[in-house]
Image (cartoon, helix red, strand yellow):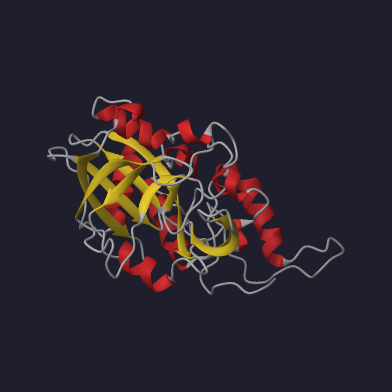
Amino acid sequence: MGERVPGPLCSTRVGADWIDGGTTCRTRSNTPGPTGLGVADALAIVAMNLNPSKAKFDREHVYSNAREAGRKRDIDLQIIGDDYSRSAEISLNNGNYLKELIRLGSNGKQKVSESARKIQFFIIRGGAEGFLGGQPFLAGRDMTKENAGNVVFERETTDHKKIRSRFDLNDVVAVFDPKGNLIGVALLERPISIPGRISEEKTTKVYDSWNNKAVSIYRNANFSVEYLGLVVDDGMKGKDGAWIDLHKREATNGCIMLEDPDTPGLDSEEINNFEPKLIRDIVASIGKRPDEVKGTLSLGIMHVVDIK
């Protein structure tokens, strides 16, 4: 059967391989037969037949084997009251779901305000768990067998060198207006370390400093590909930290990329004029188009939720 985390077989909050959703515990397994199925596989098939809503949930919500994944799945099921027929509510387009994820993920310490002064940014660390299936940038990878917090990719740096680097795919950024309405959300592709460019020590130090810091947007035209970058005032830029923005996926020396399935290829003519939907939606919320952003515009405050 392979290695599995010890725990109860009969529960509404256990992994996809266990039998649950109204089934009963077995005290003995069947004698192995010619089917070649292991006990866990057989139980999983029984569970899918008895609870098609759970089977649909497991197909549509992919969790990795990272340490945050189990807790995130438990929160997701708590939000829908352990009712798999409500699985469609677990969506990055559902503002109410994201608000509950922020509240429960922070153990009630943080919430989306309905009377904030500025735009509210929330990085939810571990929040990408459950949304790792069907992403174009993960094509061909079975994320259930990988740690989404530590994934190796070959990526280009700004001098067009392709380097095998480590990335954290666990996190999302959700953005709300001052009244608590969802502006937009994006999965994050955060470099952990890029050989010859930036170390894990620096990326971690910068990222860990972002809670309750001011967020602005500006146009960066210093590289071959221009972008609108979300920049956090972490107090370390040009010092012992590093200048790390959030922007569209392209060449990176350490900046965090906002995933958008419509992102053009790095060598395409469209990449310069493209901005991900989240950036367009943020800019629209302050009454502007991307091409109207000049200089640096103050937007709001960054909040960090760490699902553990």
Q: Is residue 164 above or below residue 265?
A: below
Give 289 or 48, whichever is nearer the viewer.
Answer: 289
In the picture, measured across the screen, residue 199 lies left or right of residue 46, that is: left
Where 40 falls versus 88 (above or below)? below
Quadrant containing the C terminus in the rendered view: bottom left
Give coordinates of residue 194: x percent, y percent.
50, 65
* Horizontal side, residue 298 vs residue 204: left or right: left
Q: Residue furthest right?
A: 34
Residue 115 in view of the camera? yes
Q: Which residue shows up at 53% across the image and 37% down it? A: 263
Viewer-nearest residue: 6 or 59: 59
Q: Position of residue 9 (x, y in %)?
A: 55, 66
- Residue 48 versus residue 166 in the image, above or below: above
Q: Quadrant where the N terminus lies?
A: bottom right
Quarter of image, res 41: bottom right
Residue 234 in which image quadrant: bottom left
Against 79, is 285 above or below? above
283 left or right of 45? left
